[in-house]
Amino acid sequence: MPGSIRQRRDRGPDAWELRVFVGRDSEGRSKQKSTLFRGTKRAAERELARLVVHQDDNPVVVPDDEARGWGPATTINDAIAGWKENDWDDLSPATVRRYEDTWRLYIKETIGKRKIASLNPYDVEKYFRKMKNDGVGRETVRYVRSVMHRACRLARKWSGNQLHNPITDTELPQWGLEHAPTPVRAPTVGELRALLDAAADLDPRYAVALRVVAATGVRRGEACALRWDDIDFEDGVLTIDEGVVPGNGGAVVKAPKTRASIRKLAVGEGTIDALRSLRRVQEELAADCEVELPADAFVFSADPGGELPPYPDTLSRAFLTARKAAGLPEDLHLHSLRHFQATALDSVVAERQKQARLGWATVHMARHYTDVIAVEDRRAAEHVEGLLG
């Protein structure tokens, strides 16, 4: 068969894996080239047909699996490439993009070309020192080290322990306090109210989205994934069971990493009223465009039918726009609203309930994922609602 297609729901609602037969190796084993396509099934089928024709017109030589080898000639780039082929398909698009950017920007054209067998901890630490002297931040250097460490550890395993891991015993340079990142802080009640007032002059979707984040402490990806059928308007409850992450083809909806992230949250009457108002706005937009607004439409979607979730970065930009309009300090970020929730609840509910409300995995067993909204969670919602005004 020259090609095949299968839907990859784990990579998004319109993701398709296209496989094209490229030949057989010296052992007679079939070799295929795969690619991820985003679009309708019909468009994916057309793209598969194009790839098959292209392959027929441009045959490639299929190398043996053994040709790569894992030994003295293996470079760090080889190790990362092998890791990518063997494991990255199972990672979230955001993680893959961060790995690829780190590899491309800080490793590929420099230390990545070095043979692993030729490196020792001194060489690697010298490279980290150079990165610091070039102005690269502490967290970036730390991330570069973690990527290289993982790749070299895999290369050691694949080589049957012929290769060593030169990253294992390395230490990072020291950064002074002046180089430490500015910690995220919770806004004061006054700052938060000023922010929400400023957001009211923006697109109503983002104004309500920021209020929901402040009222519940949900992560930005969880807010972007909120659907209309996740909202119980009668009881004032939101169901959080999905997240949106940035992907190469746009926003990608995915299941949460831990069960603790799947939760039901009580919200106050003011936030429910804001969501009702937004629902009317979205219904009017859908009617003007002569499309349906289905029950599972995304609440904060810019699409008239609510089919596409908002890109997470748009919510961050909306926060920055509102922050500037309100004249608030630059040390406030979208994530500050999650800190506000945690800080505001310190004296109101037990630590366990606060962690459950914020979706921290440490309280998974304590919460048991019941559908009943705890009395403490309702008290938490009412307390935060009073602060929002």
Image (spheres, rainbow, N blue to C red):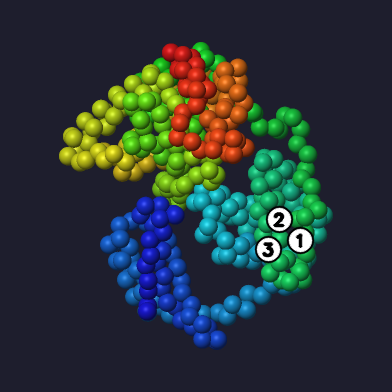
In the rendered image, the quadrant that contains the C terminus is top left
Q: What amino acid is at disc 1?
A: Asn
Which residue is at a point 20% across and 41% down the rendered structure image? Answer: 291
Kindly indicate whether the residue at mark 2 contacts the one at mark 1 (C-beta within 8 angstroms). yes
- Name the front one of labels 1 and 3: 3
Image side of residue 362 versus residue 118, left or right: left
**Relative vertical location of residue 328 with respect to residue 253 in this rendering, above or below:** above
Q: Where is residue 299 in the image (x, y as percent from the top left)?
A: 34, 35
Nearest to the observer: residue 192 or residue 13? 13
Image side of residue 150 versus residue 354, left or right: right
Q: Name the residue under label 2.
A: 149
Q: Name the residue under label 1.
A: 165
Q: Is mark 2 on a helix, strand or loop?
A: helix
> Which quadrant holds residue 260?
top right
Nearest to the observer: residue 330 or residue 230? 230
Which residue is at a point 76% across and 61% down the rendered structure image? Answer: 165
> Which quadrant holds residue 188?
top right
Q: Position of residue 301 (x, y in %)?
A: 34, 37
**Relative vertical location of residue 6 with respect to residue 60 in this rendering, above or below:** above
Task: Answer with mark 1 or mark 3, whichever residue precedes in sequence.
Answer: 3
Task: Answer with mark 2 or mark 3, whichever residue precedes in sequence.
Answer: 2
Q: Mark 3 points at which residue?
A: 154
Q: Position of residue 221 (x, y in %)?
A: 47, 39
**Relative vertical location of residue 122 with respect to residue 259 in this rendering, above or below:** below
Alpha carbons under labels 1 and 2: distance apart: 7 Å
